[in-house]
Amino acid sequence: NKVMLRYLEAILQELKLEEHAKALGVPGLNRNDVYKFFIPLPQLSVQEKIVKTIEALEKKAQTYVIKDFDNQKRRILLDGIK
């Protein structure tokens, strides 16, 4: 099976490998540690759909963060000049 790098990145982030490494008290994971994790590898078309959905969600989250920042900034300014 082929794998999209963006899909693989999302899966690895979801597995939180860094947290597992810290819990074990080692600065990184060795190859044998990684082999213990199940990494689902659907067909390429499914990976593409997953990646598109994640990217759309990330874009919405970014927009929300920017809007929330603007709202909070506005509140701080208004509270400060009252």
Image (cartoon, rainbow, N blue to C red):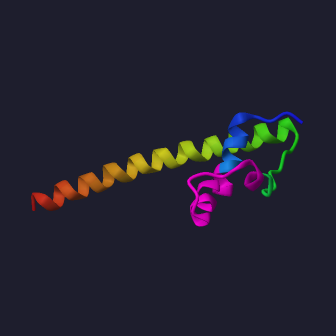
Near-viewer residue (70 or 27): 27
Please tell me which residue is depicted at 43% across the width and 50% down the height of the picture: 65
Q: Where is residue 81 in the image (x, y as percent from the top left)?
A: 10, 57
What's drawn in magenta, residue-wise? 13-34
**43 relative to 48 in the view: left or right:** right
Count of number-bearing discs:
0
**10 relative to 40 in the view: left or right:** left
Majority secondary structure of the magenta segment? Answer: helix
Q: Position of residue 60 (x, y in %)?
A: 54, 46
Near-viewer residue (63 or 9): 9
Q: Where is residue 36 in the image (x, y as percent from the top left)?
A: 80, 58
Please tell me which residue is depicted at 63% across the width and 61% down the height of the picture: 20
Residue found at the very far bottom of the displayed protein:
23
**11 relative to 46 in the view: left or right:** left
Residue 33 magenta: yes
Q: Quadrant of residue 80?
A: bottom left
Q: Where is residue 1 in the image (x, y as percent from the top left)?
A: 89, 36
Residue 28 magenta: yes
Please tell me which residue is depicted at 30% across the width and 56% down the height of the picture: 72
Near-viewer residue (78 or 20): 20
Q: In which quarter of the image is the C terminus?
A: bottom left
Q: In which quarter of the image is residue 23?
A: bottom right
